[in-house]
Amino acid sequence: MKNILWIDGQGGYLLCDSEEVILGQAAPECLADLAIRGDISRRAASIRRVGEEHVLTPLQETYLDGRPLDRPALLPERAKLTLGKRVELAYVRPSKLSCSARIDILSNNRWQPLYTSAVLLSDSCVLGPFEDCHIVCPGWSSRLVLFRKTGEWFCRPPQGETVQVGDMMAGAPFPLKLGQKISSDEFSMILE
């Protein structure tokens, strides 16, 4: 899956569930999974999920927490990545219970297409108001969980709550589908 989850009042989050993503310059016929408008090569670095960890491999001048990187390195739970001289990214793995991580742009560059953050999905993604959520939604009162089961993605509403899924109400986990609007009194979102 490589889709954008649009959350009203929050922004758009690119959801990537492949084991490896290439970060690179947004250019015609772009080869990068995570394309950045900036002065970097078309294939600047890769991030690969290995078990419950992520490994960063430099494909051009790359720095990890300010140190030059010349070989693959295991990413800590929080790290600053610099591609080339000016493209700065934050890698955040907010929960010890999930290998999913978020990548935010810190510099004045932008993702192409435009979205807020990229989420490297493992088997789950937590949305909610808490710092241990993959997508932090300050106005919410509880967590909503996306999870993978038998190769398909599902959405689990907050415990004890029902959500509007298209024209139906759901209180139990339901399959996540493209174009499906999911909403409650607190939120509204759609996967494109």
Image (cartoon, grey):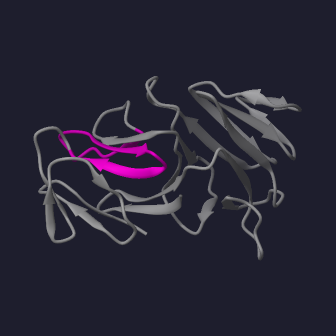
Give the side of residue 68 with respect to residue 146, left or right. Answer: right
**Magenta part of the chain:** 134-157
Taking the view exactly as shown, the residue that stands out farthest to the bottom is 28
Q: Residue drawn 43% across and 69% down?
A: 192
Q: How many numbered circles are shown?
A: 0
The percent position of residue 70, horizontal first and vertical second, equals: 89, 32
The percent position of residue 105, horizontal first and vertical second, equals: 59, 50
Is residue 137 shown in magenta? yes
The vertical placement of 88 against 9, above or below, is above
Q: Residue drawn 31% across and 68% down?
A: 180
Give the side of residue 68 with respect to residue 156, left or right. Answer: right
Q: Quadrant of residue 76?
A: top right
The vertical placement of 179 against 24, above or below, is below
The vertical placement of 23 against 30, above or below, is above
Taking the view exactly as shown, the residue that stands out farthest to the front is 150
Is residue 51 shown in magenta? no
- Between residues 60 and 151, which one lies in front from this camera angle? 151
Q: Residue drawn 25% across and 39% down?
A: 143
Give the side of residue 151 with respect to residue 147, left or right. Answer: right
The percent position of residue 45, horizontal first and vertical second, equals: 78, 46
The percent position of residue 54, horizontal first and vertical second, equals: 65, 33
